[in-house]
Image: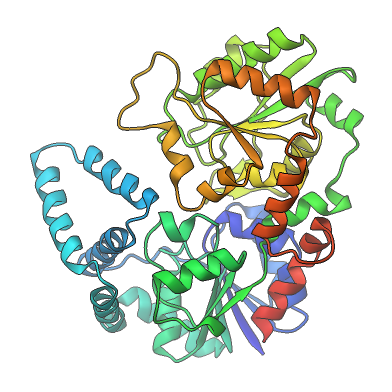
Amino acid sequence: MKLVFIIPRGEVLRNFVYSGILAQLKEQYELHLISIVPNDTLKDELTELADEFHVLEEKKLSYGHGYLIDLLDLAHNRYLWSEAAKVRWNMRDVEAKGIAAKVKRTANKLFARALATDKRLRALENYILKKASGEPAVQYYQDLLEKIQPDLVFNGSHVHSKNAYPIVQAARILGIRTGTFLFSWDNLTSQGRVLPPYDRYLAWNTAIKEDLLRIYPSLQPKQVHITGTPQFTFHFNPDFHEDKATFLKRIGLASHERYVLYSSGMSHHMPYETEVAELLADILKDIDPNLRLVIRTYAKDRADVFEELKERRKDIIIPEVRWEKNHQTPLQEDQYFFTNLLRHCELGVNVASTISLELCMLDKPAINIGFNPPNRDIYPYDYTRFYNFDHYKPIVDSGAVTVASSPENLREVLLQYLEHPAINQENRRKLIEHFFDIKQGTIAAHFESVSQNVIAAMSS
């Protein structure tokens, strides 16, 4: 059996390479990797892992084909019309500067509204797929796949797929079976259309499977396999664990000190977030001089966002995030560091982040910021909007996380959790068990089995 595995984005390395999944798949398949190259070291590792390695070439589509894909994406956004989709639509309106951009935006929105039904979206999608056979980028990969003759072409991330599109499209033209991993829990209700469609989808949980089948009613339930996600397995792997004393020393803390973890978001969506983090640091300092703030900056954001704060506030710890910026690639050493950063914190604070789930699965209290930076007008942005997004509202409603409604309320919640960390412990456990469909066994056992679930789903 021959497997072509596509790595279109660095985070796929974390999910499928660092987790050992690709190494296990190599035992069953002749493994052909088509991958981005973040750096020479990772290229050497991937080349050694694969039976045959191919660099994922950035092949441009024609302007007309690219425009149709963008129009399909916009129309899908209108068809979806989730809370996240509404925000995304509004943000694009705000970003359209100048008369020409506004006219173009208005015209595209008119087209999108007219196309925003399942039937019309599928008609446009089929037209795009039909026209793809004439694209040089697709023909390039069609030639490559004809040489390999794979049994399965699998894309490691459905959402990071612009560069993978010509490969998967070529596979469809050749009648080769295709599959993909639904990358994140929010993507289906907040991002664009899954293009091209696949024969098989791997999903985190039942809710994501149901979202996929609801949004794409032409799909059959048997095409979607629930496997869990590999990105959390490291937290339960002893090889990635470091004892607390050693880790505290690593980040510059004494053995008697404790820390609260603040996880930042994308500055474009959360303006003045450094001020929120500094406010948190001041509250912690007032509560207990031995209680420090550690900030995990968002790896995919601009590198300089927290530099001024880091220079000015030496009491705040802002470790380097060990990602290779090329292709947004987490390095394995960073995954080790991040796992221990979560394991040894007292609690975590963030704005509607996936890290809330990770805190809950490790039984750490999670606080969400439910107010905007004080004395700042950040329209059209709003921190509170995230808590009504389709993917995140159930997390808030579960009672597993606490949304702080003001700086004063943030202080109250911090005091409660620091004194009684078991508050909402049962809600945290129930959330993770429900979210990941854990009906028997422990949370740890579930994540230890994810790799085998993924391999079984791909091999079936």
- Residue 328 makes an appearance in the image: yes
Left or right relative to 426: residue 229: left
Left or right relative to 398: residue 108: left
Check the image and tell me how it is coloured.
rainbow
Residue 110 versus residue 224 in the image, above or below: above
Left or right relative to 168: residue 73: left
Camera-nearest residue between 53 and 377: 377
Identify the residue at image location x=74%, y=27%: 417
Q: Position of residue 133 (x, y in %)?
A: 31, 83
Left or right relative to 268: residue 251: right
Identify the residue at image location x=61%, y=76%: 225
Camera-nearest residue between 415 and 165: 415
Q: Image quadrant of residue 404?
A: top right
Q: Position of residue 232 (x, y in %)?
A: 71, 54
Residue 327 versus residue 53 in the image, above or below: above
Q: Position of residue 10 (x, y in %)?
A: 58, 55
Q: Image quadrant of residue 52?
A: bottom right
Identify the residue at image location x=62%, y=64%: 204
The quadrant in which the N terminus is found is bottom right
